[in-house]
Every structure is written in C-alpha cells, then in structure tokens.
Image (tube, rainbow, N blue to C red):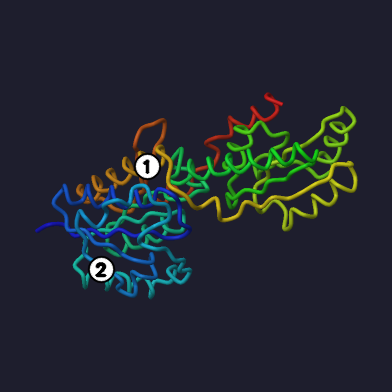
Amino acid sequence: MAKKVGVLTSGGDAPGMNAAIRAVVRAGLRNGCEMYFVYEGYKGLIEGNIEKVDRSSVSEIISHGGTILKSARLPGFKDEAVRKKAVEQLKKHKIDALVCIGGDGTYMGAKKLTEMGINCIGVPGTIDNDIASTDYTIGFDTCLNTIVECTDKIRDTTESHSRCSIIEVMGRHCGDLALFSGIAEGVDMIITPDHPISDEDIIENLKEWKKAGKQHIMIIISENIYPDTRVLSERIQKETGYESRVEVLGRIQRGGSPSAQDRVLAARLGAHAIDLIMEGKGGLCVGLVNNKVVHYDIYEALHLPRDKHMNLLRLIDLLK
C-alpha cells in the first residue's frame, strides 16, 4: 500500500516555501506516495482542512512568494488534547506521515506528533535564519536581498540630506539578517543581539565621525533591540548634530519571488524530507551544513547553540 504523506506550512511565511512544497509533492509522487495538502498549518490540520493533490497541483508555484497552503499560528497546539484532534484527522485520512515547513515552533509540533505515532519531518522555512541545525533557512537569502535593495535606496536619500539613517530589520532574536546585510552594505554600524553597542558608545562614535567631517551615517539594527528605535534616533539627533531618521522595513522583507539560492535549497531539503519518510523515520529535521544535506533529531536541533555565523562578527570592525 502506498504511503500517504501530508505537507503543511506553519508560522511566519517565507519566500521559497512554495518551492519546498513543490519539491515535497513531486518527490513523494516519484516514490509512489499519495500526497495531501494541509491548509493553514496546525490550525487547518485539527480542522481537517486536507486535500489530496497530484503533480499539477504544484505546477507554476516555484517562483511565487508566500505559501499556497496559507499559514497560521496555533499556540494551543502545545496542549496534548489539541494534538490528539490532529492525530484523529490524520488517521481519518489514513495519512502516515507529515512534512512540516516552518521554524522552531513548527519543529516542536512535528516532534510531538511523531511521539504520538505520526512520523513528521521538519523543513526550515523562516526568513530569520534562526534554526541552528542548518547554515541557511529557506527564505533567508531572499529576505537578505530585499533588505540590501531597500538599503541601497535609503542610502541615496541619506547621502543627499547628510542624515543618519537607522534601518531596523527583522530577525526576531537572531541577528543574521542585520549582520549579513550590514556587511553587504558596508554600513557604519551593525547592532545585533550578538553584537550589542551601548547608547553611549553609539553617541560617542557619531560625535567623532561628525568632528572628522563624515557627512552621513548608515546604521543597521535588529528588531527587538529597543522597544522603540525612535528613542535612539531622537537622542542621536539631539546630541550629535546629525539629522536622524528610522526606517523600519517591516513585512516587505517577507514578500517577493524567492531567489535562485532559496529555490535550490528548498528543492534539496524537500526531497531529503521524503527520503527520510520513505525510510520510516520521523521526529527529524533537515538542513544544509557545509553545503551537505543533513538531518538531526528535532530536540537536538532545538538545543544547538545559535553561533553558526559568529565568525563574521570580526568583519564588522575589520572592514570599517
């Protein structure tokens, strides 16, 4: 009897999720599986929002941003009674296994379902790059390029008006988007959870640069460093003489057609997820480490230190 395999996306959407869905469905069909869409993440799973699909169901989606399966957050999925409803729906549709595309919350849901008898494989789909078991998550590269494109445009007006521009980027509690975009843009200052800079040091640096005749300043900062980054901006303007502006890029960072790198990454990881399911494995997540496709136990993955790109921090000071 053919395996029946479902696929869902959960948590925040990320460019490349559709490419991953496509890879999972196509690889599953090639292995003789029956494939099913689960709409709206774990919420749709417990509601039975499930549909059998074929090869044509994923045609022409590889270049589309977002997720055709929609996404939703369901904090209540931590409750075993809620997860039992999900298991009941999967058994009702005779689904043997599930591929779950998302971040760490998605991974935990996949692990818990595996412990309840449904083999699940996690695929890292999140712009934040905050999954330690993979060098890069699906969506990170596209988001990074969006930030770089926006920052290029902001730089033009910053230079024209001799301003200090503080560009706040996403990342939740991970500073990779700020770190990579800051290095790519050659900005004057990068502030992340792993590379904090005190307000006093920020002010003193800007005063010195002003005295040295520096006409404009570009700062990239991770979200959640300040409750309101405008407070820092107002202090900079008051104490350094630079006219200051905050640019919060917001959800524009989530959108757009996925980059070639994200599409290829999605294809590699989606296909490997099906390989693991065909081997009868569950409770695992896939990733890319040193350009090799790997997998980890989800609990192990969630407890790995998030220091995979700390070596890049030296470039911040080296390339000033």
Instruction: From the top left corner, tell me how far across and down residue 139 is, in percent.
Output: 46, 46
| Residue type, label 1 | Arg
Q: Which of marks 2 and 1 is nearer the N terminus?
A: 2
Label 1: element kind:
helix
The crowding category of the residue bearing disc 1, from other C-alpha atoms within 10 Å (few below 14, some 14 to 19, many at least 20), is many
Label 2: element kind:
helix
Residue at 86% across, 29% down: 213
| Residue type, label 2 | Leu
Residue at 32% across, 70% down: 86
The correct choice, above or below, for 212 with respect to 11 in the image is above
Query: Cα distance, mark 2 to mark 1?
Result: 29 Å
Location of the N terminus by quadrant is bottom left
Viewer-proximal residue among 114 and 21: 21
Q: In which quarter of the image is residue 81?
A: bottom left
Label 1 sits on residue: 263
Instruction: From the top left corner, tell me how far across and down residue 50 is, in percent.
Output: 27, 68
Residue 129: mark? none
Residue at 36% across, 70% down: 44
Instruction: From the top left corner, tell me how far across and down residue 121 is, in percent.
Output: 32, 52
Q: Residue furthest front?
A: 160
The correct choice, above or below, for 180 with respect to 131 in the image is above
Location of the C terminus by quadrant is top right
Q: In this view, does 6 lie to the left or right of 233?
A: left
The correct choice, above or below, for 90 with respect to 217 in the image is below
Label 2 sits on residue: 90
Q: In this view, does 289 lie to the left or right of 29?
A: right
Residue at 41% across, 35% down: 289
Viewer-proximal residue among 121 and 256: 256
Residues tagged 2 and 1 counted as in contact (Cβ below 8 A): no
Instruction: From the top left corner, tell me how far across and down residue 5 is, in percent.
Output: 23, 58
Q: Quadrant of residue 268?
A: top left
The crowding category of the residue bearing disc 2, from other C-alpha atoms within 10 Å (few below 14, some 14 to 19, many at least 20), is many
